[in-house]
Amino acid sequence: MDTKLIKEVTDWLKTTDLAEFCYEKDGDCIEVKTREALPEPAQFTCSLTAVCAPAIGIYKTAAKGKNLVLKEGDTVKEGDSLGVVESVSKQHPVTAPVAGKLRIIAAEDGKPVEFNQPMFFIEP
């Protein structure tokens, strides 16, 4: 394809309000898309605050000798205990970063969790 023709087409496209253009002649084809033609990435917003695992380990709803029962819909205060993650040599506390209602409990007692895995979602 003739580069002069490509330049002419792209210069012409800049003078229009078209977002994309396709030109075909004698088996040659040129397709030009401006930034406006590109799809916008999806934007998601969420009012829930994620509580993520502080370490790799086994999630326990409460430290040994304590009893803690959490249910979706429970009200929690900032700093409330949501359990612990037990690693090889340490217990890592899981606490509520904000006050609100527990909307989703994704962690199960006695099951492994990965570092930074969302375990709870709180609606402030």
Image: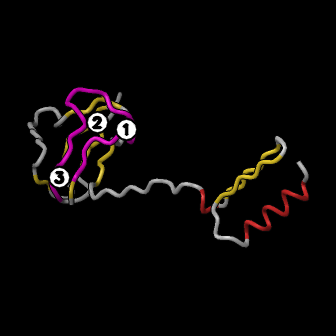
Q: Residue 62, image x and y in percent?
A: 16, 37
At a point 28% along the width and 59% down the height, the residue shown is 47
What residue do we see at 11% from left, 48% from top? Answer: 73
Image coords of residue 124 (percent x, y): 21, 60
Amino acid identity at mark 2 = Val
In the image as oriented, which residue stretches furthest toward the front?
Answer: 26
Disc 2/disc 3 C-alpha distance (Å): 15 Å
* Circle 3 Cα neighbour tier, 10 Å, few/some/many (<14 / 14–19 / ≥20): some
In the picture, measured across the screen, residue 24 lies left or right of residue 93, that is: right
Q: Secondary structure at mark 1?
A: loop
Q: Quadrant of residue 21?
A: bottom right
Q: Which mark is residue 80?
A: 3
The crowd level at tag 2 (other Cα within 10 Å; few <14, some 14-19, many 20+) is many
Q: Is residue 52 magenta?
A: no
Circle 3 SS class: loop
Q: First in sequence: mark 2 or mark 1?
A: 1
The disc label shown at residue 55, or none: 1
Which region is colored magenta?
A: 100-122
Q: Which residue is mark 2?
A: 85
- Label annotation for residue 24: none
